[in-house]
Image (spheres, grey):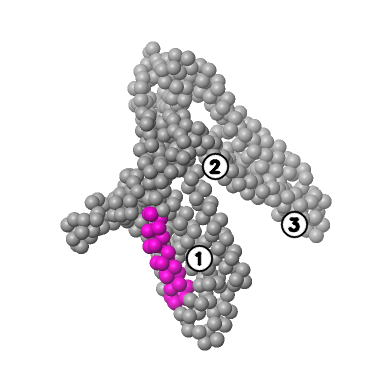
Amino acid sequence: MSLPLLFLFVLAIAALGFFVGRSRAFKSADGDIKVLHSLPGYYGWNAALMVLLPAIAVLMLWLSIQPVIINNNVSAMISEHAIAESSLDLVMSDVIRVAEGLDIAVEKGAMTAGQASSIRTELTDVRTRLGSVGVALGSEVSSETLKAAQRYREMSSFGHLGRTVLVLAVAFAGLAFGYSRSHKDFRARNVVEQVVLWILILAASIAVLTTVGIVFSLIFNTIEFFKLYPAADFFFGLTWSPSFGGGSELGILPLMWATFYISLIALAVAVPIGLFAAIYLSEYAGSTVRAFAKPMLEVLAGIPTIVYGLFALMTVGPLLVDAFGQDGAFGVNWMQGGTAVMTAGLVMGIMLIPFVSSLSDDIINAVPQAMRDGSLGLGATHSETIKQVILPAALPGVVGAVLLAASRAIGETMIVVLGAGAAARLSGNPFEAMTTVTAKIVSQLTGDQDFASPEALVAFALGMTLFVITLCLNIFALYIVRKYREQYE
C-alpha cells in the first residue's frame, strides 16, 4: 500500500473512532447529555486521537528506520573495487535508480514482477530495456549493481508491507482502546486538552530545535573553515578570489560592502514609497480605492524573486544603460553594462515595497481612533495629526517593517545574481557590477565540491556572518521599539 493511501486509511479509522467513541459515550449515559462528564465531541476526539497519534508515530519511526536498514544491507553487497572507482554514495544512487526503473517497468507492463527479480545483465541489455520505459541511466548497468537493485526492491517491498500491517494494527488497537474508554465517567475533556497542549508544545519545540540545528550546523562548519583559513584574512581581506586548485584569497569585505550597498539602495526606494503608500491607504483613501489598491500592491509580494531578477536583467538594466551609458540620454559614461548595484537595488526596492506598506498600514490602522479624535478636537489639521500623533504612535511597528525589509534585502539571492553581476570589488560607483554574500554562497556550493576544502566551507562562514548581522539588527530594532513604546503607552 502506498504511503498516501495508508495515511488516508488511518484518517478513515480515526473518523470511525470519532463517531463510535461519541456514540458509545451517549449510550453509556442513556442518551442524557447531562450525565456525561464532558461534551460528546470530546469523547469522539479522544478515540480519534488514540488512533491518529500512535499510528502516525509508528509511521514516522518506520520511515526513518527503514531506509537506514535497507541501505546498510544493500551497501554490503557493493564490492570494494566499485567503491574505489567511484564512491559508495554514487554507487548507491545508481542502485536506487535501477531499482526505481525496474518498478516503473513493472507498472507499465514492460516486464513482469518475476522478470524484474530474475533479469540478468548477461542475457539482457538492462540500460536499453529501462530506457524504453523512460528511465535514463548514465552508464551501463553492471551485474553487481543489478543484483543490489533487485535486493533493494525486495527489501523495500517487504518493508512497505510490514509498514502497512504494523501501522494499521496500531490504528485499530488505538480504536479499540479509545472505544473502551468512552463511557460517561471518563474525563475526556481533560485528556483531549492535555494531548492538544502537548501537540502545541511539540510544534513549538520543532520550530525552536530547527533554529538551533541551523545555528549549530553553521557554527561547526564555520569552525572547520577557520581551522583551514585565517580568520583575520577572512574578515579584513580586501580580495575575494577563490580557487579550488589552491592559493585562494577569501576576504569578505568586498562582498559585505556590495550587500549593504544594494540593501541601502533598496531601502531608499522601498521605505519612502511603502510608508507613503501606507499613510495614503490608511488615512486618505476611500473604501473603494483601498479595496482595489491594497490587494494590487500586495501582489508584488507574491511574484517569485527569479521574475524580479529577469526584470532587472532584461528591462531595468538596459534602461539604466540607455540613461547613464556612453551613448545614453545624459551623455555620461557611468554605466558599462546592465548588471550593476543600481540595477539590483532598484528592483529589490520594488520587491520590498509591499513588506513595508502592508505592515505599516496594519500598524497605522491599529492606532486607537481616540488619539485621532483627540488631536483633531484640539485643533490640529489632518496632516498635523498624522505627523505628530499617528506616526509616533505607530513608530515601533514601522521600525519592525523596515527591519523586515532590511533582513529580506540582505538575504536576497536571485535578484543580485541576475542584476548585480559577479564581480567582487570595493567601489562607491553604484553603476558598477558587484556581488553579494548570498550570491557567493550559491556559487561556492554549486556543483560537486569537496567539503573538506576552505573554498567550500567558506559558504558556511559567509552564512554565519549574515546570521550574526541579522541578529544584531533585530536586537537593535527591539531596543528602539521598546524605547519608543514606553514613551507612547
Q: Quadrant of residue 240?
A: top left
- How many angstroms separate mark 2 from mark 3 (CA)? 43 Å
Judge depth for marks 2 and 3 and give the one in front. Answer: 2
| Residue 4 visible, this orientation | no
Labels 2 and 1: the sequence-earlier one: 2
Amino acid, disc 3 = Leu
Amino acid, disc 1 = Val
Residue 7 lies left or right of residue 169; in this view the side is: left
From the top left corner, tell me how far across and down residue 479 is, in percent.
57, 61
Q: Nearer the viewer, residue 283 or 138?
A: 283
Is residue 402 within the magenta segment?
A: no
Q: Quadrant of the C terminus?
A: bottom right
In this rendering, is residue 216 above or below 476? above
Residue labelled with disc 3: 39
Labels 2 & 3 near each other (Cβ < 8 A):
no
In this rendering, is residue 81 above or below 340? above
**SS majority, magenta:** helix
Residue labelled with disc 1: 398
Q: Residues within 10 Å of mark 3 (few under 14, many from 20)?
A: some
From the top left corner, tell me how far across and down residue 298 is, in percent.
43, 62
